[in-house]
Amino acid sequence: MLRLMRAPNLVIGQHWVNVLAVAGIRCELHNCYLNGALGEIPADQCAPELWLMDERDEMIALRLIDAAKRGPSPDAPPWRCRQCGETLEAQFTVCWQCGTARDPLDG
Ligand SMILES: [Zn+2]
């Protein structure tokens, strides 16, 4: 187990988990239990932590999350996966077919 990073909030944390899960990376959000107290304590004190089940996934996980953070612009055109050639809508930061993260240089 490896603590990868802290998510700014539960929604984003869960989004990152989804991104990693699509890529076949096993991970968990910890600290979520504090979410039940949201509204009573400052939000920044219940930031969830993203943990990797396998620390060997660290580099690819960081890449995927970095891509997810940047996200596409709303009117971004579809892009083509450089790994398998699949065409993907702009809102996907990871190829659903093969799990390859979008390369910023891809059209
Ligand atoms: Zn692909």
Image (spheres, helix red, strand yellow):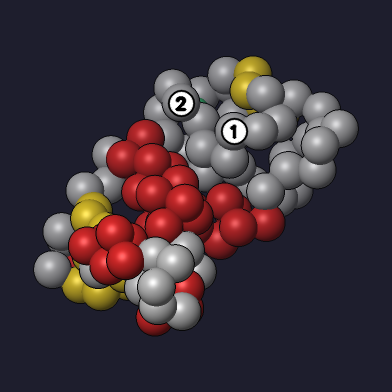
Q: Mark 2 packing: few (<14 Cα in 10 Å), some, or many (20+)?
A: some
Report the residue marked by disc 1: 92
Secondary structure beneath disc 1? Answer: loop
Q: Is mark 2 within 8 Å of ligand 1?
A: yes
Q: Which residue is mark 2?
A: 96
Residue 32 screen position, x and y as percent: 27, 61
Q: Splitting the image into 4 quarters, where does residue 87 fall?
A: top right
Residue appearing at x 38%, y 41% in the figure: 18
Of 26 and 13, the residue lying toward us: 13
* Image coords of residue 31 (percent x, y): 25, 68
Q: Relative to 98, is 2 on the left or the right?
A: left
Indicate whether 41 appears above or below 76. below
Q: For the residue marked with disc 1, what is the amino acid? A: Phe
> Can residue 7 be seen in the rendering of this structure?
no
Which quarter of the rendered picture does the N terminus lie within?
Answer: bottom left
Q: Quadrant of the C terminus?
A: top right
Image coordinates of residue 2 in percent, x first then y, are: 20, 72
Q: Nearer the viewer, residue 57 or 29?
A: 29
- Disc 2 and disc 1 in contact, CB within 8 angstroms: yes
Q: Is residue 57 above or below residue 91?
A: below
In this image, 100 relative to 89: left or right? left
